Amino acid sequence: MGEIDTSHGSIGRIGSSGLARPRHGEDTALAILRSTFGYEAFRPHQAEIVDAALAGRDVLAVMPTSAGKSICYQVPALALGGLALVVSPLISLMSDQVTALRQAGVAAACLNSALGAEERREVLSQASRGELTLLYVAPERLDDPAFLDMASGHGVALLAIDEAHCISQWGNDFRPSYQRIRSFIDALPTRPPVMALTATATQQVREDIEASLALRNPLRVVASFDRPNLSFSVERPSSRADKNAALLEFARTREDRSGIVYCMSRRAVEEVCDSLCEAGLAATRYHAGLSPEERERNQEDFLFDRKTVMVATNAFGMGIDKSNVSYVVHYNLPLSLENYYQEAGRAGRDGTRAECLLLYSPGDVHTAEFLLSRTQRDDLTPEQLQTMHEADEARLRQMVFYATTTDCLRSFILRYFGEEAPAYCGNCGNCLADFEEVDERTNALKILSCVARVRQHAIAANSPATSVGAGSLVDILRGSRAAKVLERGWDSLSTYGIMSEVPVPRIRAIIDELVFREYLTRSSGDFPTIELAGRGVVFMKGNKPFIMRIAKGKPRAPKRDERRTRKARNAGEEAPDLTPEQAELFERLRELRLSIAREQQVPPYLIFNNATLEDMCRKRPISAEDLLEVSGVGEKKAERYGQAFLDAIAQEA
Ligand code: ADP
Ligand code: ZN
């Protein structure tokens, strides 16, 4: 979707004046949630946050992607009347929100660098005339004198800061422009309640947000990061070819469902997209190297369900609230669990079952380190840069641990975000895999002593190369004749070739485990090398076993004859709780939604999302009144689209 057309005649006129101006308070908030957004009840934490904002209190809300942060400031904005400002970092994020709000009949607009001067003036004058309820602004706009004039003249009822972690240099997306928000608040004649919202925040970042915005005794809410409808898994293909095959198999068996494949580089995006297309899948691509026109076209193809798979770099997705993405595959290792969880979290936003798969190969670590070391930030001081690099490295290490652990993946993620979690979720690749426990003490000892021998050998030869890369270490242990091995004289070591009968992936897995348990350390930098750590030395001297969980095989995949027909599978898997009749209806409604969406040129999920269609199939409303009982149907949408859907349901009966 492109920029919002602010000259769109309707926005001024649906102004907040068109809505009954309600009394403040809880009942009002619930009434707005029901009438405007069509939701029956607040989700966990939403009511508490809304109440605080309505009572004039600051808020710091940490909630995972899809928990429903927007409602937390949109409902108070409507309840308070007046003008609510929302600071948001990305243009695509703003346009999406504004389009969705207008669909629900809310007077919303945005101000950012993508607008022309004329459009900007028009938005500002609408705001001064009191015709806007929600105005989204880019942080860079905050020092614009015309904007400050409007804000101080007209008054600001509420200030919400979305993606608030951008303010912290410890965060994973530091934007110095966010630090202007504080002086903007100070410049306002009357200080509004300030709400900071984010999906990623460690304790340090939380404290930083509070301090940088000078929040006053805020209500602090940290929601659970668990997304029960997502199932996580990691596969560790041993070669590039295996990785491609794994991806193809995965995408093919989910052919008519919508999915995203994230890759680390533009080149990988191109190659993966080509191979999916060659295999007959409807794939498209997105990365910063494409022309803006092509990016926009491809994004729309995906949003409108004309293409089912989006292959993209991390440039894609911020602000893409496509609710029916049913899987996210990472073809390469993300740089941090924050990134991973945010990207993977784009699956299953409507609450239906969805899958998140990471395809991990150890070579990715090297590429990731290279990418991190290359980050240029002219806007940071050398000290800030140093801090950022250290934080980056620590985050990448955790990401590798996630990729190599055999413990419950969900619990790994939740614990990373500071939450208590049971050790078994029963719904991730590791919980479902068939593992056997094996004592790898002998192999672990061979690896550790090989690392020690390399060091002794280098010292004896007066060479500075006292440590060894993981690739060379495997070569030595397997007795390879690789040039580097021979050049360094590693073929004379007593550990040369002592693991020649052990497969490479197994040796790699044991090395990863040794690093994970801190028996070995892996240095950072362009050429990471491995060294013996104190714990490793202790282990070598002792007689403890080294128990590892080794996968016996892949978790059982459904057999061919268990797969249903294309149509039934399609409807059934996106809506797992529907009866066959309901699933038929779901298909009809989905087609209807698609034709309305094409006509109106908005993405289908902005008409009604899948969860709403499912609820419609279950409740089978026959009157306009029934229709309002369906989750996600507000008054405005019922008015706009209700009849068409009621007709389709009546036809089916
Ligand atoms: P976040 O900003 O936390 O990632 P969103 O605000 O985009 O999440 O909300 C995610 C989805 O949940 C949206 O489709 C939204 O409309 C829906 N949603 C939010 N609150 C509720 C609620 N109380 N009941 C039902 N659906 C909700
Ligand atoms: Zn699990």
Image: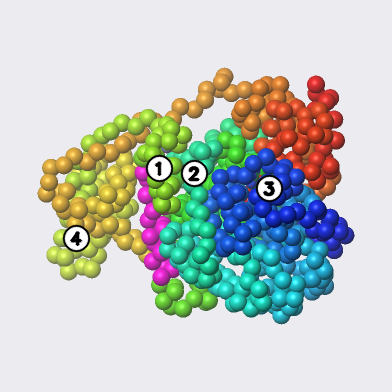
**Circle 4: element type:** helix
Residue type, label 1: Ala
Compared across the picture, whether 370 is left or right of 470 comes to: right
Disc 3 versus disc 4: nearer the observer: 3
Q: Are marks 1 and 4 in contact (CB under 8 Å)?
A: no
Mark before the other along the chain sequence, 1 or 3: 3
Q: Are marks 1 and 2 in contact (CB under 8 Å)?
A: yes
Residue 153 numbered tag: none
* Residue at the disc numbered 2: 226
Mark before the other along the chain sequence, 1 or 4: 1
> Badge 4: how crowded within 10 Å, few (<14), some, or many (20+)?
many
Q: Residue 211 location, x and y as percent?
A: 48, 70
* Residue at the disc numbered 3: 27
Compared across the picture, whether 126 is left or right of 245 comes to: right
Residue type, label 3: Asp
Q: Nearer the viewer, residue 111 or 359?
A: 111
Judge whether residue 547 can be spotted in this image.
yes
Residue 455 numbered tag: 4
* Residue at the disc numbered 1: 421
Disc 2 versus disc 3: nearer the observer: 3
Q: Are marks 2 and 3 in contact (CB under 8 Å)?
A: no
Q: Nearer the viewer, residue 585 or 312?
A: 585
Residue type, label 2: Asp
Residue located 73% across and 35% down the image: 629
Residue located 23% across and 52% down the image: 519
Real-space Cα separation, disc 1 to disc 3, in angstroms: 35 Å
Disc 1 versus disc 3: nearer the observer: 3
Q: Residue 368 location, x and y as percent?
A: 44, 58
Residue 107 among magenta residues: no
Real-space Cα separation, disc 2 to disc 3, in angstroms: 29 Å
Real-space Cα separation, disc 1 to disc 2, in angstroms: 9 Å
